Image (cartoon, rainbow, N blue to C red):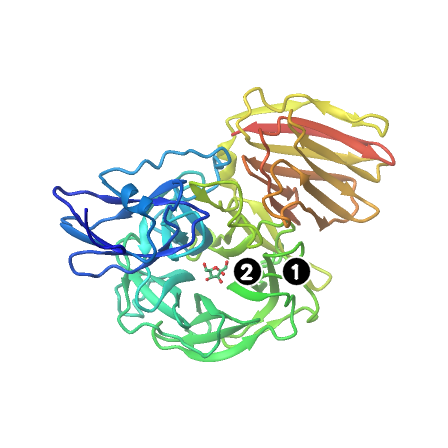
Amino acid sequence: MEHRSENQAVIHISHPQKYLLLPIEEQAEESTVWVKDMNGNNRPMQIRLAQQTVDYYVPYLLDIGQKDLTVEITHPHPVVWEQITLSDTYDASNRETFRPLYHFTPLYGWMNDPNGLVYLDGEYHLYYQYNPYGSIWENMHWGHAVTKDFIHWEHLEVAIMPDELGTVFSGNCIIDTQNTAGFGKNAMIAFYTSAGKEQTQSIAYSTDQGRTFKKYDKNPVVSADIPDFRDPNVFYHTPSEKWIMVIAAGQEVQLYSSENLLDWKYESSFGEGYGNHGGVWECPDLFEMEIEDQPGKTKWVLLLNINPGGIFGGSATQYFTGEFDGSVFTCESKPETVKWMDWGKDHYATITWSNAPDNRKIAIAWMSNWQYANQVPTKQYRSANSVPRELKLYRQQNESYLINEPVEELKQLRKSEKTHPAIVVDRSKPYHIDSILEENEGAYELEIDFRNSSAEVFGFTLFNEKGDHVDLYYNLPEKRFYMDRTKSGLVDFSKDFPAITYAPVEKADTYKLRIFVDKCSIECFAGDGKFVMTNLVFPEEPYNRLSFYSKGGDFDVESVKIYNF
Ligand code: FRU
């Protein structure tokens, strides 16, 4: 390394090397780091380079054949120059206690919103908001992975990188089967927000199964003088033979139309006075769905993520249902109606896969909350996605509601099944299951059927030897199902983390729950899909005990099935 000044050094590369390894210290302030290749082309990144200690390293991918690199750092600590090294390998093996086993996480670095969900030739693509240079939000790129079964994910190279228009914020992908844009038949086209001085909407396209993207040379394609103007979501509207783009714009959405995917015309806005307005609207997704048991009858669903303003604070997903005529979305509900898609604290930026086979509508959410996403106790990576969920639509009292169910594919995770005999739980003493699994790695599913006789409050506690516990229970007088994670393990990394969340329930004779536990998360699905509650938890060891309890009467646990994953 040859120092040119306090801020600049030239690194001579004598034989081909793949990476520059950069030392990160999460508490350090950001430096602007500019790794200039032979053509001086690369973009500067904001990186928390080590000042005192090295928390971990991140790899900076070098071009093949790179000889001399100039590295420029705004306020380098001498430690940094000592720690930067060249390497042919980067060790991405897992070093995290809380890394989920079957939920998607990035190998390293920060992840937020799922982006560009699209199905093509047997693969479900997942792009995502990604910082490859540290496990804290910054430098947005589109990371990339694919799955065939929603269980095994293949990590692929970063798909879209920042450019002179800005970093690459959220958006979606479509398959241009008719070559309307002229990038080629069946080109995959990504729409995303270029987040620079302004937020504008840009296009990139791929003709190699989503592996690499070229940016459209006339970007941006949609601009407006609105500060929060982002997260484009495009779909084809068959009756009007037009492409539609929905964009979050402050606290409403704007709709645009196009015939060629390149030139866009403003059509309408939706949102003023409707739903929740506790924060900025983000990541919209508009699609048509058939109503359950009413073949041929459809409604339009507008998923809309909001931050802050979520029902339990911070981020959450609301949705609207109604009609769309190719220009205007009309909500069927009273303006003050708010429909939440998930009743936990960690379900955000939800969007659905486009072009999915068999007319499936599959959604996935970022399983975190902007209130504490940057502080959760992991390092090598931050954030997981929810399990993918199959959406259906049902009608009740002249309103349409979403059903959320875990995708059928997840049943393949069930490696072994343990069934408990029926249990009568009376109010005088709880019933304990002392060991959920002999070898509990913290990744399992519980399927529980209840029959209530006289209890007012009934449910169970999941806990471990350390005393970390989560309570899940129905409170019938309040017509609610609750999850209490206030004593669930590590909770004090943020004042907003300890929480009790609840979903509305109707009184019934029987109740069924499917609960997915995966190291640091609990997703609780009502058997009929009418509510789902997603919450993060950080227990010091896996919850391996369960205790049923009841208040104000008795109830039966007709069946408990434990599936080890
Ligand atoms: C939602 C969001 C989007 C934006 C992205 C930036 O979580 O704020 O609106 O495009 O994250 O990473």
Image point 71% across, 33% down: which residue? 461
**Number of dots carrying numbers:** 2
**Up/down of 212 relative to 153, above or below:** below
Tell me which amino acid carries mark 2: Met
Q: Is residue 274 left or right of residue 214?
A: right
- Residue 220, image x, y percentages: 35, 73
Q: Which residue is mark 1?
A: 339
Disc with the residue nearer the chain's start (1 vs 2) = 2
Tell me which amino acid carries mark 1: Lys
Q: Secondary structure at mark 1?
A: strand
Q: Quadrant of residue 453?
A: top right
Instruction: From the viewer's side, name the closer residue of 241 and 198.
Output: 198
Q: Is residue 53 left or right of residue 44?
A: right
Instruction: From the viewer's side, name the closer residue of 556 and 473.
Output: 473
Image point 62% across, 58% down: which residue? 294
Res. 476 in view = yes
Image point 15% across, 57% down: which residue? 38
**Up/down of 446 relative to 320, above or below:** above
Crowding near the residue tagged with mark 1, few <14, some 14–19, many ≥20 C-alpha atoms within 10 Å: some
Give the CA separation, mark 1 to mark 2: 16 Å
Q: Quadrant of residue 335?
A: bottom right
Residue 158: numbered disc: none
Crowding near the residue tagged with mark 2, few <14, some 14–19, many ≥20 C-alpha atoms within 10 Å: many
Q: Is mark 1 within 8 Å of ligand 1?
A: no
- Residue 498, image x, y percentages: 66, 45
Instruction: From the viewer's side, name the closer residue of 510 and 23.
Output: 23
Q: Secondary structure at mark 2?
A: strand
- Residue 368, image x, y percentages: 54, 49
Q: Which residue is mark 2?
A: 289
- Which tag is nearer the camera, tag 1 or tag 2? 1
**Up/down of 276 relative to 348, above or below:** below
Q: Residue furthest top?
A: 438
